[in-house]
Structure formats: C-alpha cells, structure tokens
Image (tube, grey):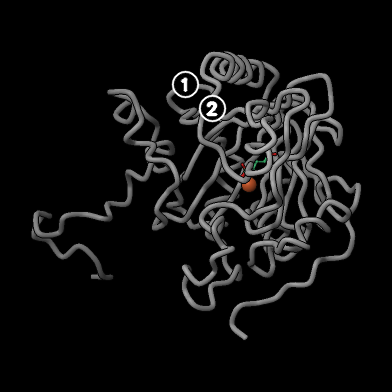
Amino acid sequence: MLRSKAPVPASAAGCDVVLTLTPDQAEPATVCEELLNGGGAVKITGLFSAEQIADARQVIMEESDRDAVKVTHFQGEAMEDGTANLQRRVWNLLAKGAVFSEMAAHPVIMGILRLWLGTEFIMGSIAANRILPGGPGQEPHVDYPYWDFHAAETHPLGLNASFPMNAQVTIVLDPFTEESGATAYAPGTQKNLRYPGVEEQKAFHDDCARMIGEPGDTIVFFGAAWHCAMPNRSEHDRNAVLINYLPKWMKPLEDMPGAMPPGFIEAASDDIKQLLGMNYPYPEVLDQADATNAAGRR
Ligand SMILES: O=C(O)CCC(=O)C(=O)O
Ligand SMILES: [Fe+2]
C-alpha cells in the first residue's frame, strides 16, 4: 500500500497549539522536530511589535474594505450560502507595505525555515485572511502544494510527508479565540499525508485543537496537517497574515516577482530576493544561457 491511510489522531478538542515558545526558545531544531514528528504546529509568542501589527492591520482593513471580492479557497459551502463575502483576502502583500517584508523575512522565521526547507527556500504566497463578524470557516484541508491531494493520483506515486515541501506561517493581527475563529488543526495528521475524507472532515470538528493567540503571536505549521479557518462568532474582525514557504524548486502559488512594482526587486534585501526566487534560475532557456559548466562539484 503506497498511499497511506492515516487514522484520525486522538482527540485534541479544545487544546491550544501543542507547543508554545518565546522567540528566544524557538531554536530551529526544536521547532522542526515538533513540526515533523510532534503536533505539526508551534506558536511563537510576541514575535511582532504592536506598531508592526497596527501597521499591517490598517493596510489589510483598508484594502479589504475597498476591494472586497478576490479569489479564495476551501470555501465551497460559503459560496453556496451567500456568506463568502464575510471572508476577505488581500493578496500580494509585499507590494502593499514595507511591514510585510519585515514579517516575511523575520530572522527567527528565516532561521527555522532554513533548516526546515533548505537554506535557499522561497515564498509561495503572502496574503491576509480577514474574517468579518458572522463570517464563515473553511473545509478542513491541507495546504499548497498538497492542497489538491484529494486527487492523489495527480501527484507522484508514494509521495508522503517524510520530508517537508511546505511551511505555513500565520501572524495573528486580532485576538485569535475559539469564538473569533482561531484556525483549527488536527495535531499529528501531518505525519501521514492525505486530504481528509468527507466523514473525517465532519469528525475533525470534534477533535481539533485551535491556534489561539494574541496580536503579534505567530504560528509556524506544517501545511500537511489538516486545518481550516473557523467561523467568526465574535463581534470583531479576525485578521491574520498567512505566508506559504516552499523549497527552492517548487512552483510557487503566487507569481510574486511578476506582481511587484517597478524597482521593488532591485531595492529588496538579500533575504527578500531569495524569497522571491531570484537565487534559483530555473526554468531557464538553456539554449540561450552562458556557455559555462553550470552544475557539478567541480
Ligand atoms: O485563516 C485561517 O485561519 C487559515 C486559512 C487557511 O488555512 C488557508 O487559506 O489555506
Ligand atoms: Fe490552509
């Protein structure tokens, strides 16, 4: 049996993120061990300042008030019942404020992900998810590049999560509580890569843990773990910055270099250039490349 059938893990109902660390405690090896072999998610408290959070939140609220209708995912039910407009995306955040470059390339995140995804990892997407009061949750799912794993046969034979091809970072901008729709996840499901079945999607809600957090807290998780945004039953907006990171050789979700304003890439830091994929040249028109020996130890 090459495609694994993971059991639903023991109940985590009502739990907060399994492992919570301060930025000083968030050693790359500790975090990566928890992502791969533990619960699949780590919360790092107070990673961003109140000023950074206020700055990011203001941009996201303004953008999503002005330009509310954007592509979204895992929201089939809300599309049908007419509540989809109460969940709003703001895409391409790097182009929308310097604070988002600070967030994407935070040294604690970079250190962890250099170990997790290889030193030359890239960013696949940086977007906001705003859920308005009364807004909908999502179906439990896995994230890009596994997100269409319900069609497992379209992926390589035997593909599994023994090594990561994804990291998710959620930066909390408003209180993430059970009531406000803190992301739900099923600890341990990242160990056996597959998309939850229909019955498992229903059972997920009895067993899930929640990514509870304060503004400035940051959750790093392995997107192979079953998870979803939850309905916002509070009186306030629930905003988060969601970042997807990938090994250097994955095809990213967003064409970020293509969406940047003129001059952005030239002026960017080395870390941001790396995140935009500038350090890895492929695919390349090799017929027109410099006539050098471009690979090999010698
Ligand atoms: O906003 C959230 O809580 C999670 C969103 C998510 O998992 C996704 O859009 O893939
Ligand atoms: Fe997701």
> Is 24 above or below relative to 27?
above
Tell me the quarter of the picture where residue 206 sits: bottom right
Q: Position of residue 88 (x, y in %)?
A: 61, 27
Q: Secondary structure at mark 1?
A: helix
- Tag 2 residue: 90
Q: CA distance from mark 1 to mark 2?
A: 9 Å
The answer to which of 204 and 250 lies nearer the viewer is: 204
Q: Is mark 1 within 8 Å of ligand 1?
A: no
Tell me the quarter of the picture where residue 3 sits: bottom right
The answer to which of 297 and 15 lies nearer the viewer is: 15
Q: Residue shown at 65%/38% (left/top)?
A: 80
Q: Mark 2: which amino acid?
A: Val
Classify mark 2: residues with Cα within 10 Å, few (<14), some (14-19) or many (20+): many
Of the two numbered discs 1 and 2 in the rendering, the one whose residue sits closer to the viewer: 2
Q: Position of residue 251 (x, y in %)?
A: 39, 53
Q: Mark 1: which amino acid?
A: Lys
Classify mark 1: residues with Cα within 10 Å, few (<14), some (14-19) or many (20+): some
Q: Position of residue 102 (x, y in %)?
A: 53, 28
Q: Is mark 2 within 8 Å of ligand 1?
A: no
Q: Position of residue 44 (x, y in %)?
A: 73, 40
Q: Is residue 96 left or right of residue 52?
A: left
> Is 34 above or below relative to 20?
below
Mark 1 or mark 2, earlier in chain: 2
The reply to whether discs 1 and 2 touch (Cβ–Cβ < 8 Å) is yes
Q: Residue shown at 37%/38% (left/top)?
A: 273
- Tag 1 residue: 96
Q: Residue shown at 70%/35% (left/top)?
A: 81
| Quadrant in which the C terminus is drawn | bottom left
Give the image quadrant in which the ligand numbered 1 is located: top right
